[in-house]
Every structure is written in C-alpha cells, then in structure tokens.
Amino acid sequence: MTTVAIHQPGYQPWLPFFKKIIDSDLFVFLDDVQYEKNGWQNRNKIRTSTGSMWLTVPVKAKLGLNLNEIKIDSTINWPKKHTKSLEINYSRSNNFTNIWKHFESIYDTRFDLLIELNLKIIKIIMQLLDIQTKTVLSSELNMLEKGSKRIVEICKALGANTYISGTGLPGKKYLDLDDFAKNNIDVKFYDFTYPTYRQCYEPFLPNLSAIDLLFNEGENAKRLLLNAKA
C-alpha cells in the first residue's frame, strides 16, 4: 500500500501541508505548475500582538511562468523585514532561541529562485518535526497531462493506491473521482482541524505558518500535529 499526497511548496507553509507529508509514504512537491499571484506560494501569516500579519517574498513574476521559474526580487530587502518581524513577534516564545538558530542563516543567504527558498524552509521544518517521508519534485516526473488527469498519472507513476486531497481546490470539485476509481486509487479527503496550542498572544489564532507552532511548542510540536484530526 502506497499513499501519495501532492501540493505546491509555498513559503513557510501552514500545518495541514505538513500533516499531509506525515501521513504520506511519498510526497510530491508540485513545482511545475503555473505561479499563482496573491496566493500562498510566496507568502504566509505569522502571529502578532494585534492579530496576524503577512510575510511576503517579493518576486519577478511574468504571466505564464511556472512556480519553479519564479525569481525573487532581490532589489527589495525583504530578509531584513522578515527577520525583524519574526524576532519582534516571537522573541518572547519559550522556544525562540532553539528554533530560530535553524532559520537565521536562511535570511543571510541570497536565493535566486523562490522554489529554492521555499524548499529550504520546508526541509528545515520537516527536520524539526522529525518527518522522514520521502519527497520528489513533480518536474522530475515529466508529466504532460493537466488538471485532475495529471494527479492520477503522478499517482500511477509512483505506484500509489491512495491519494490524500484537501477538501478545497484541488478537492471534490476539481478531481475526476471516476478516473481515480478506474485506476484503483482511493481518494482520502482531508478536513484538517487545527490543534489548539499556546501562543504568545491571546486569543488563539489558527491558519498560521507552521513556524508559529514550532516557536511556541518546540519539541511538543510534532505530537500536536500527529494528533491533529484530518
């Protein structure tokens, strides 16, 4: 039995992204799909004393480019802003020093492509959460199909008999479930319930970057994510 999940690698992804990786035997980073402006590929939210704020990586995005072709706009000093925002809002967290040391060097490194930055951060978070799932880039699979058909072909190429999907897009309205059934692939829909954990500020806010959980819970983060309902 092989379970596969597929998702675009965004910037500092939220917890459902990593829950999918944990519950998969193989996880595919969907890197050769069209870049989505104002999506989650180059931004995410962190907790602040007044609610939440976006951390956005500026990019040079032209119409029709794939995610793995998007370049970071290095004329803007975004690393300084992100570093300052993380330090200001999480320095009082119980695990700031232990977690920040893993990320600090990222903001001293010049990344040309957004995908390089995103994957570097994702791999660090996976390490901190002790996630051992094998990963692969969709661009390495050389798939020509589009949409739901492409997901099916990726699953077939990896020998999957179970595919994990979110309840949103791509979800029930996006996937051709008959096509999955014809290829003997079960589809498991995730409806992720955020675990409640301590944050630096109240009230608790869900739907933030996974680093929020790491800064606040440290070594306890993996247990909370493992026990989260999906």
Image: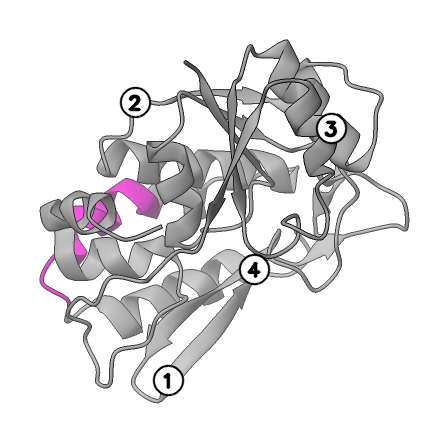
Disc 4 is placed on an element classified as: strand
The reply to whether callout 4 and callout 3 are in contact (CB within 8 Å) is no
Extent of the magenta region: 93-104
Q: Earlier in the sequence, mark 3 or mark 1?
A: 1
Task: Tell me where residue 51 appears, x and y as whole percent.
Answer: 37, 84
Residue at the spot 66% in from the left edge and 59% down from the top edge: 58
Task: Tell me where residue 91 appears, x and y as whole percent.
Answer: 19, 68
Q: Nearer the viewer, mark 1 or mark 2?
A: 2
Tell me how far mark 1 sits from mark 2, CA to CA.
33 Å
Q: Which residue corresponds to mark 3? A: 179
Q: Earlier in the sequence, mark 3 or mark 2?
A: 2
Query: Which residue, as the protein is rendered here, is positioned at the far bottom?
Result: 50
What's the amino acid at mark 3?
Asp
Q: Which residue corresponds to mark 2? A: 132
Residue 151 shown left or right of residue 167 in the figure: right
Q: Which residue corresponds to mark 1? A: 51
Q: Which residue corresponds to mark 4? A: 43
Asked which quadrant contains residue 69, the reply is: top right
Q: Is residue 143 magenta?
A: no
Please determine whether, in this image, residue 124 is positioned above or below residue 224: above
What's the amino acid at mark 2?
Gln
The reply to whether callout 1 and callout 2 are in contact (CB within 8 Å) is no
